[in-house]
Amino acid sequence: MPYYRVIGEIPRKRHIRFSRPDGGLYAEELMGEEGFSSDSSLLYHINPPTAIVKSEAISDAIARPSLTQNHPLLPRHYRTQELPAGGDLVLGRRPLVGNDDVTVSFASADAASDLYRNSAGDEAIYLQGGAAKFESAYGTIDAVAGDYVVIPRGTIHRWSPAGDTAVTALVIEARGHIRPPKHYLSETGQFLEHAPYSERDLRGVAGPLLEEGADVPVIVRNRAGLSRLTYAYHPFDVVGWDGCLYPYAFNISDFEPIVKRTHAPPPVHQTFAGPNFVICSFCPRPFDFDPQSVPIPYNHHNVDSDEFMFYVAGDYSARAGSGVGIGSVTLHPSGFTHGPTPGAVEAVIAGLEAGRTCTDETAVMIDTFRPLSLAAAAAAAEDPEYAWSWARAGARANPVT
């Protein structure tokens, strides 16, 4: 995280005695990245955060989803609304794609999750619809539609739907850390003036959050799979913490689009960076303003990336007529040139001439620098005709063999 925060009560200096009202000492817990050489926070627990009384293995279907290579090579389209709904935002995840760097899942959650700790990497949860309360050892975040909630590796937390509607969300699980792109930050970590968002747009936790309990189960994910550790004391017993490592929320509506005279490539939409992948936010923006501009993506083949796109609101003009709509996800893999649906360019130009001035689509894109494999669970929601959508206005497409 790019800046320091303090929540609750902390002592005058780090690693000195901090006495509880009963005369005992609060227990320190340093949450730190990269072996004490990167961001960290120091949490003060009422009880020792180390006391576990039981450990058991549980099903690892979520931790290690079944993945197959995208072969024969095809662009893919899945309709998330056709995936099974229900469950919670942890064990109710339906994997879509993944590789050794990242797993992307979808959830339509109507129940509260168990306490959960992902010790394999950071997570970014994008809420498409509904609202949820995120509770953690650091405190709480009231998350709403459009929020990215970024959760550092090792954070014990749980999700609870807020209201009567299910929470629909895209879940991005990294095998490392998810951070603002370095080119948005100064050498000391402050957002620069050209960045499309700033510290004011980030919402940290409200807290502290104090709960009592004994023999409290926590689902823990590491690279071996899922375990259930039973803690002697409730992990939500932090009276205060300080540092630069903590969960936070950023709403996609606070992203400031970068506009050029002619069409700008996806790096202008970059929002976060992970290990060998980036997360981008496509938001409503003014059309490119050169009188001769073609205000829609050109055909492109990013030879080093697979492109995964989640369409969350509005009308994505470039894919008009392809079957893509709100709730769709597409995968455009390396080895395949993709671009506007035939006729989409002319339709947008006609809209400009009729007085239309801006786009209205919202989408979340993940570009990975290693190929994405396909999760078996998503196959039932696939549109088998999508790959031929570019050919429908021209030559008849040949079936794959």
Image (cartoon, grey):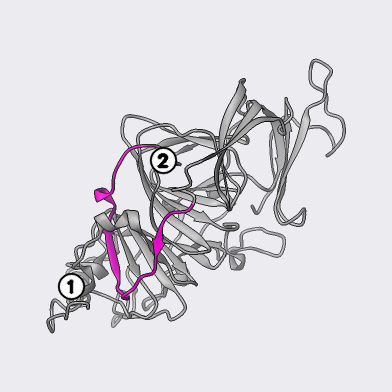
Q: Position of residue 289 (x, y in %)?
A: 34, 75
Q: Position of residue 25 (x, y in %)?
A: 82, 25
Question: What residue type is disc 1 on?
Answer: Ala
Q: Which residues are magenta?
A: 64-87
Where 314 sits versus 140, above or below? Answer: below
Instruction: Give yes or no for residue 273 being in the magenta stretch.
Output: no
Residue 231, disc: none
- Magenta segment's dominant SS is loop
Q: Position of residue 59 (x, y in %)?
A: 47, 43
Q: Is residue 98 left or right of residue 379?
A: right
Name the residue tied to disc 2: 144
Residue shown at the point (17%, 73%) measured from the top left: 347
**Residue farthest along the top direction in this orientation:** 22
Where 346 sits versus 255, above or below? Answer: below
**Residue farthest along the right direction in this orientation:** 16
Regarding residue 314, the answer to whether it shows in the image is no
Going from N to C along the chain, the mark reached first, 1 or 2, is: 2
Q: Is residue 292 left or right of residue 260?
A: left
Q: Nearer the viewer, mark 1 or mark 2?
A: 2
Front residue of 328 and 248: 328
**Quarter of image, res 379:** bottom left
Residue shown at the point (55%, 66%) measured from the top left: 194
Q: Secondary structure at mark 2?
A: loop
Question: What residue type is disc 2 on?
Answer: Val
Label 2 near label 1: C-beta < 8 Å?
no
Residue shown at the point (62%, 20%) measured from the top left: 212
Name the residue tied to disc 1: 347
